[in-house]
Amino acid sequence: MKKSWKAAALVFATVMLTACGSKADTNQTNDTAVSAQPQQTEESATTDKTSEADVQEAVPETGGTLTFGTNAEFPPFEYVASSGVIDQYDGIDMAIAKNIAEQNGMTAAVENMEFDSLLVALQNGQIDAAIAGMTVTEERKEKADFSIPYYTATQVMIVKEDSDIASASDMADKKICVIQGYTGEICVKDLGYPYEAFKKGTDAIMELVNGKCDVVVIDSATAQKYVFDNDGLKIVEDASAFASEEYAIAVKKGNTELLDKINKTVEAMLADGTVAELGAQYIEAISAE
Ligand code: ARG
């Protein structure tokens, strides 16, 4: 069966920091690199007074290693490949991470871990930054500081092609699968529906393919990859139930020195079209597999 893999559209979106809910900009359901002039969030412009003192080594020295934490289970943003841009790790985020390190005179390294462990690893100093298609939420902003956003996405529903699910409320009496700790889980919880949480997107998709669940709620670009890889699935969007989300890079709270460097590079990569190009390139690469 022929599948189409939609190219990322370059559309500006007004985005809320809620992971989901009915505040969505209803005209905006396509994935997109964010506008070339991203707004600085109030929080990232403000210095965090509480934790600045505990930052030992805010930025690795020139020639040093900048360690990014990720969860390489989220194509096209991060996945394991035979040869990636940073070791075996490939994807849009990995290319952005490499660029950030290089532009700042460092070498990028990746620590692959569970998605739920990333913010703890930042707090422990095990990693310098987390880049993982991570949506900025109010709750996460209490645990880490976020860069300017680089990508806009939304939650979507993946269902069997013959499914009668046409909107989020149609999930009410269905078996719903989500990925543990992802914003998709938060959205389904907020909608008040029972669900089963899986460790990996591919595990949830297997349940769907095997008819053991009716719908998987996950981020749009990753959903497109799964639908491309598995026959008999389709994507259902519902912009009134799922708001736009913004992906950003997280650093330890108070590490403004590293955050400033990351923001400068991300801003330049958005302005010169690098992020949009990477998006298009990785989406094309996946659909050509
Ligand atoms: N955007 C979603 C979130 O922030 C899912 C991110 C999953 N990323 C990953 N690398 N596994 O919760």
Image (cartoon, rainbow, N blue to C red):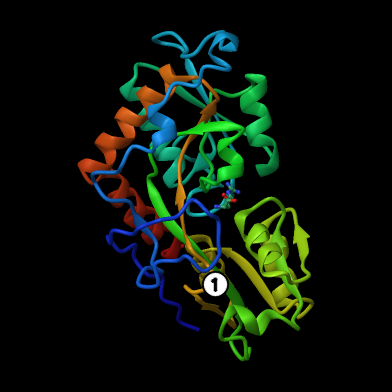
Give left or right: position of 103 versus 195.
Answer: left
Tell me where residue 22 appears, x and y as whole percent: 52, 69
Residue located 41% across and 76% down the image: 4
Crowding at mark 1 (Cα within 10 Å: few <14, some 14-19, many 20+):
many
Secondary structure beneath dot 1 equals: loop
**142 is higher (above) or lower (below) than 206:** above
Amino acid type, residue under disc 1 in the picture: Ala
Residue 19 sits in quarter: bottom right
Res. 4 in view: yes
Disc 1 target residue: 241
Res. 147 in view: no
Camera-nearest residue between 260 and 283: 260
Tell me where residue 216 appears, x and y as whole percent: 65, 70
Residue located 74% across and 53% down the image: 199
Residue located 73% across and 72% down the image: 176
- The number of numbered discs placed on residues in the rendered structure image is 1
**288 is higher (above) or lower (below) than 17:** below
Tell me where residue 82 appears, x and y as whole percent: 54, 44
Residue located 76% across and 60% down the image: 197
Whether the residue carrying mark 1 lies under 8 Å from ligand 1 is answered with no
Give left or right: position of 155 versus 115.
Answer: left
**216 is higher (above) or lower (below) than 271:** below
Tell me where residue 130 appears, x and y as whole percent: 54, 34
